[in-house]
Image (cartoon, rainbow, N blue to C red):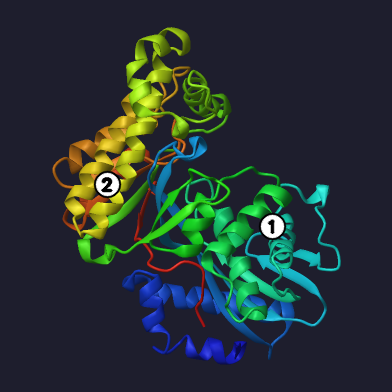
Amino acid sequence: MIKTADLKTKLTTAEYDEIFAKIYKKEDISSQKERYIRIAESFEQLFGSGREAGVFSAPGRTEVGGNHTDHNHGKVLAASVNLDAVAVAGKNDENIVRVKSEGYKMDVVDLADMSVMPEERGKSASLVRGVCAGFRNRGYNIGGFDAATASDVLSGSGLSSSAAFEVLLGTILNNLYNDGKVSAVEIAQIAQFAENEYFGKPCGLMDQMACSVGGFVQIDFKDPAVPVINKVDFDFASCNHALCIVDTGGNHADLTDEYAAVRGEMESVAAKFGKAVLRDVDIAEFEKNIPVIRESAGDRAVLRAMHFFNENKRVDLQAAALKDGDFEAFKALIIDSGYSSYMYNQNVYTCKAPSDQPVSVALAICSDILKGKGAWRVHGGGFAGTIQAFVPEFVLDEFKSRICAAFGEKSCYVLNIRPVGGIKVI
């Protein structure tokens, strides 16, 4: 721990530059120091000067491979990014947690009552209470703390701002009260528990796991209760590419039934074989019975099942390519995944509004600029929202210029893959 006054002084020097360079882009170190000083000043204003505190960070995440596979117990490749949620936090002896996030009112949670509060559903206070309850349920220590936080993980961008916040809370508790002994995997599971049981959102584990573990993470959901997690070692900084997330400005409203149909149609194919999910269906049996399935479940369901089976294989191949340091093979697999989502899974635009296809337009621009150079694909749920592109540095300026001309000045976010997950920074 460090006194906040000393923290602010040291942030004006080069003392923390090495850890900052590991977390952020080198050109962003100066602005990040200013950000940390601002959060420390907020902590002092809220909770008093002269306090000892730690500084903690948890990143957002991006889905790299495994588009629409997790809900049918498939495989996913995800990665943490250099946008993060940061906290300056210190213990108190009141058995109360106070969390003040920039732009939001303060959450105050009394640890004397860890039960689910219906009135907190959908609110950040429920995540604070839920993470604390998750630690207690697993036999770990909990206690009161005060925290000032700020996040630059873009809300609604598919980068999982809520998972970053949950993992940030878990990282604070882990270091303030448990000597850092709680594993990144357990913190992710606790974060998922908080979101499922307290916040009221039945999310999977991919978001929290990528935020907590950091770097590239391969996850197999064959048994969702006990997912198999493998960290994939790859130095993204060495490949001279940027990860770009493009916000096409599409509206996710009224798309719930489209997302549900992807899962429902995959499961309707599985049901033809007496299974609940496609992961439990034998691929050879599926291929042999395509004529029967077409007739009973429809052609789109068949195509979506084909996407699932092939996307699962691609996740393994993508992870293997990264492990082998073959970034060109990895990019080719990203493009294959994008084409599969477009043609087979059909989650790039909705047939309800064929004149409204911002994701399709973004992908077309990407193809024009990046063909033979980079890689591109729909990002996340699809139908609207964001795309993902791996852009070589020598065409990055052109890429940003053309994307922003089409979708607006702030539509292109240039990111890096962050090699570490939730951590105590200082």
* Residue plotted at (54% across, 69% down): 183
Q: Residue furthest left?
A: 372
Q: Position of residue 423 (x, y in %)?
A: 51, 73
Q: Is residue 50 left or right of residue 209?
A: right
Q: Residue furthest top?
A: 295
Q: Position of residue 70 (x, y in %)?
A: 48, 40
**Number of numbered discs:** 2
Q: CA distance from mark 1 to mark 2?
A: 36 Å
Q: Is residue 124 left or right of residue 204?
A: right
- Relative to 205, is 29 above or below? below
SS class of the residue under badge 1? Answer: helix
Q: Is residue 230 left or right of residue 254?
A: left
* Residue plotted at (32% across, 25% down): 343
Looking at the rendered image, the disc whose residue lies closer to the viewer, 1 or 2, is 2
Q: Position of residue 129 (x, y in %)?
A: 75, 61
Q: Nearer the viewer, residue 289 or 61?
A: 289
- Relative to 243, is 170 above or below? below
> Tag 2 or tag 1, which sits nearer the N-term?
1
The disc placed on residue 202 is none
Q: Amino acid at mark 2?
A: Leu
Instruction: Name the residue that disc number 2 marks.
Output: 317
Instruction: Name the residue that disc number 1 marks.
Output: 127
SS class of the residue under badge 2? Answer: helix
**Toward which corner of the image does residue 305 lie, by quadrant?**
top left
- Relative to 3, is 360 above or below? above
**Toward which corner of the image does residue 140 lie, by quadrant?**
bottom right
Q: What is the quadrant of the N terminus in the image?
A: bottom right
Q: Is residue 69 visible?
A: yes
Q: Position of residue 153 (x, y in %)?
A: 50, 57
